[in-house]
Amino acid sequence: MILIADSGSTKTDWCLIDDRGEKHYYSTKGMNPYQQSEEELSREVATALVPQLPSKEIEEVHFYGAGCIYDKIPLMQRVLNSHLAITKCCEVNSDMLAVAHGLCGHEPGIACIMGTGSNSCFYDGKEIVKNVSSLGYILGDEGSGSVLGKLFISDLYKNQLDNELRMEFEKQYGLDVGQVIDKVYRQPYPNRFLASFAPFIKQHLDHPSVYQLVLGSFLAFFRRNVMQYESDKYPVFFNGSIAWHFQEVLQEAAHQLDINIGEIVKSPMEGLIKYYS
């Protein structure tokens, strides 16, 4: 049996391919070894994943995740090996490589993530050969759900958006400015909290200022990241909930900069299944 995982900061998609080639899908919370402790990650695997699996005996595990940088890979491997009986291999790779494998396959291209966070790379058909650091939602992550939420909240409480929009927002989420500040500066996972406002932003894209906020962030993503990879020569592939749900605005940003988008998917899982099959 082969177990494949695609993990972002908010959720993890799992697919188990059994000995008959049948596919079984599962979901757990996001697992990010850069943001979470080994104890937190271990608890999520033990309590949310293992009870869903038909057996702990797995031949291969291929885990792709946000925060799976070089010095965090051994930690994630320890977590997986401690709860699963892995007989052949336990590979842990970055979420960027998941998009490259899942969307580009064995062809060169520019692979991008646009979900709770954002990232990008140039993939030569075998490996990632260039990556502009995302820098996270405070210093970078242009176009991501967390940055869209941050920009929206800032505009909302800096009186850059009309008061009716603010009243509707506070009614829908049951929040005021004091509670927002507490969630962002004092509570865990502020990036997830900020990204949770993406559905509200999507609902109000007909508001010119909201549309321009989203478009401007997508243009910044292209200019500050994608255009460093010879984007005039290679297609640009996107994975992630923000890219998927805001794809019309994303296409508009690409059109303004003469960038060719190859494909936009909500998850690279089907491509990963094909890659390992």
Image (cartoon, helix red, strand yellow):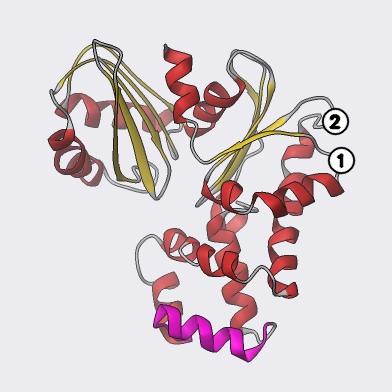
Examine the rendered structure and indicate whether residue 107 appears above or below residue 51: above
Q: Identify the residue at horizontal 44%, vertical 29% (top origin).
A: 269
Residue 145, quarter of picture: bottom right
Label 2: how many Cα within 10 Å (few below 14, some 14–19, many 20+) = few
Query: Taking the image as drawn, is residue 201 in sight?
Result: yes
Mark 1: secondary structure: loop
Q: Which residue is mark 1?
A: 258
- In primary-sequence order, the first of circles 1 and 2 is 2
Q: Are marks 1 and 2 in contact (CB under 8 Å)?
A: yes
The picture places residue 193, in percent across and down from the top left corner, at 43, 65
SS type, badge 2:
loop
Name the image quarter holding the C terminus.
top left
Residue 56 against residue 150 in the figure, above or below = above
- Of the residues shown, which amino acid type is indicated by label 2? Asp
| Residue identified by numbered label 2 | 232
Residue 3 sits in quarter: top left
Q: Is residue 141 left or right of residue 25?
A: right
Quadrant position of the N terminus in the picture? top left
Q: Residues within 10 Å of mark 1 (few under 14, many from 20)?
A: few
- Relative placement, left or right, of 256 versus 45 is right
Whether residue 210 is situated above or below residue 28 in the rendered picture = below
Span shown in magenta? 161-177
Q: Position of residue 68 (x, y in %)?
A: 42, 34
- Residue 127, position in %: x, y? 59, 17
Residue 135 seen in the figure? no
The residue under the point 59% across, 84% down is 165
Q: Residue 128's quadrant in the figure? A: top right
Task: Give how far apart the Cα atoms at labels 1 and 2 are.
Answer: 8 Å
For badge 1, the amino acid type reads Asp
Q: Nearer the viewer, residue 265 or 115?
A: 265
